[in-house]
Every structure is written in structure tokens, then in C-alpha cells.
């Protein structure tokens, strides 16, 4: 099992790009703000919070959540840009969810970081946390490995059909596309999907 805190402590964080996910910036320039709703947005597995701050800079109240205390300490060390806050916690812990509701969740490299055996638990957490009519907006890293490369994960790969299937008990997919903007090396390997909570 990955010790995420230790990875941050040792600086073994190849996912840390020092900037928000390019597909999120593409999305923010393209899609109606309605998808974020009028409540708070949750960013699970937010790491050091670049995506959180990109959303907060657009005026959305945002909560960044991460298991790793070290990541959250670094996130909190950034100057505040808007209505963002951070919390250490486990997205898959049902106890953490009690009494919490969000108008949207922004997913980016948390789904691919968790054990694939827990993907249904991830989807259930989204379903319990997003208000009816709210959205799960995900940038899913589909192919973290090159063809033929043996994968041991994390990150773990996923497929569009699998994503549709895992979220289908609670969500309808509204739109999806392969983002044009990407970190170098991730071009064409991500899928941006917006799922609406029934
Ligand atoms: C691959 S990193 C991506 C971090 C961030 N999204 C980014 O792109 O920089 C995965 C993150 O998910 C966090 N994480 C893994 N499982 C989690 C869980 N069950 N609840 C909350 N955070 C989790 C890890 O601590 C880590 O920061």
C-alpha cells in the first residue's frame, strides 16, 4: 500500500507539476459555470492544491481533501486566492462524509491513485457527497503506462466504459471529451467527463 505522506516527505511525487491540471483550465474557459453549482466544490486527493486554487480563483468555494498531512501543509502554505480551504482526511472513509454535501466534485488523479478494488467505494462516496443535480467533473488519467509496459500502480489505468459503469448507479454522463490541453507526456491519455447526480 502506498504511504502517500512518505512520498511527499521524500519528494517522490512525479505527479506534482507545480500548476493546475491543464484540462481543468481548458474546462474553466469552455463550460458553463452551472456545472459547479452554487455550493462548495470538493477536490479529493488534492495534493498540494493547485486545482483547488484554480477553482477558488474563479470564485467558487472549494475544499481540498487529502490523506497526506504533508501535502495539506504545503497546500496551506500558499497565499489564499479566494474561498479555498483544506482538510486532511480519507475520501473513502464513510465517517468523514457524515453531514457533508457539495454541489460538485472535481476529480483529478485521485481515482487512478486508489486501489482499483475500491473504485465502487469511490463512486459511492461521490454519490453520497454530491447533492442531487450536482456534478462529478473528472479528468481521468486513462493510460498512465506506455503500451506493453507492465503496470504495478499507482497510478492505475482505467477505461471509459468502466468509468461509465462504475458511476452509472447514481450518475448520468452529460458530456465527455479528450482534453486538448495536457501536461507534457499526458497528451491524449486523459478523458474529461461530466457526470450529473440523479
Ligand atoms: C497521484 S496524487 C495526485 C495529487 C493531485 N491531484 C495532483 O494532481 O497533484 C494522488 C493523491 O491522492 C491522495 N489520496 C490517495 N487516496 C486518498 C484517499 N482515500 N482520500 C484522500 N486522498 C487520497 C494522495 O495522498 C495523493 O496526494
Image (cartoon, rainbow, N blue to C red):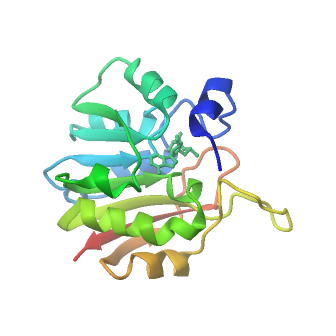
| Lateral position of residue 56 relative to residue 185, left or right | left
Residue 56 seen anywhere in this rendered image of the structure: yes
Residue 193 seen anywhere in this rendered image of the structure: no
Residue situated in front as seen by the camera: 152 or 23: 152
Q: Say which residue appears at 27% left-offset and 32% top-offset.
A: 84
| Lateral position of residue 114 relative to residue 149, left or right | left
| Lateral position of residue 38 relative to residue 16, left or right | left
The quadrant the C terminus occupies is bottom left
Kindly indicate the quadrant of the structure image that contains residue 101: bottom left
Kindly indicate the quadrant of the structure image that contains residue 15: top right
Q: Position of residue 36 (x, y in %)?
A: 24, 54
Q: Say which residue appears at 45% left-offset and 72% top-offset.
A: 120
Q: In this view, does 65 lie above or below 36?
A: above
Q: Is residue 156 above or below residue 8?
A: below
Q: Say which residue appears at 67% left-offset and 44% top-offset.
A: 184
Q: Position of residue 163 (x, y in %)?
A: 49, 74
Q: Position of residue 167 (x, y in %)?
A: 40, 75
Q: Say which residue appears at 57% left-offset and 58% top-offset.
A: 112
Residue situated in front as seen by the camera: 82 or 94: 94
Residue situated in front as seen by the camera: 54 or 167: 167
Furthest residue in direction front, as rendered: 95
Q: Is residue 53 above or below residue 133?
A: above
Q: Where is residue 83 in the image (x, y as percent from the top left)?
A: 21, 31
Amino acid at each position: 500500500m502506498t504511504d502517500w505522506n512518505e512520498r511527499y516527505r521524500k519528494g517522490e511525487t512525479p505527479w506534482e507539476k507545480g500548476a493546475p491540471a491543464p484540462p481543468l483550465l481548458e474546462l474553466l474557459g469552455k463550460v458553463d459555470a452551472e456545472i459547479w453549482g452554487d455550493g462548495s466544490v470538493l477536490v479529493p486527493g488534492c495534493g498540494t492544491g493547485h486545482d483547488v486554487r484554480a477553482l477558488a480563483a474563479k470564485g467558487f468555494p472549494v475544499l481540498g481533501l487529502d490523506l497526506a498531512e504533508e501535502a495539506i501543509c504545503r497546500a496551506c502554505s500558499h497565499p489564499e486566492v479566494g474561498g479555498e480551504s483544506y482538510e486532511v482526511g480519507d475520501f473513502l472513509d464513510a465517517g468523514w462524509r457524515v453531514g457533508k454535501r457539495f454541489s460538485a466534485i472535481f476529480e483529478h488523479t485521485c481515482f487512478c491513485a486508489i486501489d482499483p478494488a475500491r473504485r465502487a467505494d469511490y463512486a459511492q462516496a461521490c454519490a453520497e457527497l454530491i447533492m442531487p443535480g450536482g456534478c462529478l467533473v473528472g479528468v481521468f488519467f486513462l493510460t498512465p503506462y506506455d503500451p506493453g509496459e507492465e503496470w504495478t500502480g499507482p497510478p492505475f489505468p482505467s477505461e471509459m466504459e468502466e468509468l461509465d459503469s462504475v458511476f452509472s448507479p447514481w450518475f448520468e454522463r452529460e458530456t465527455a471529451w479528450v482534453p486538448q490541453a495536457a501536461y507534457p507526456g499526458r497528451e491524449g491519455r486523459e478523458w474529461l467527463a461530466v457526470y450529473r447526480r440523479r
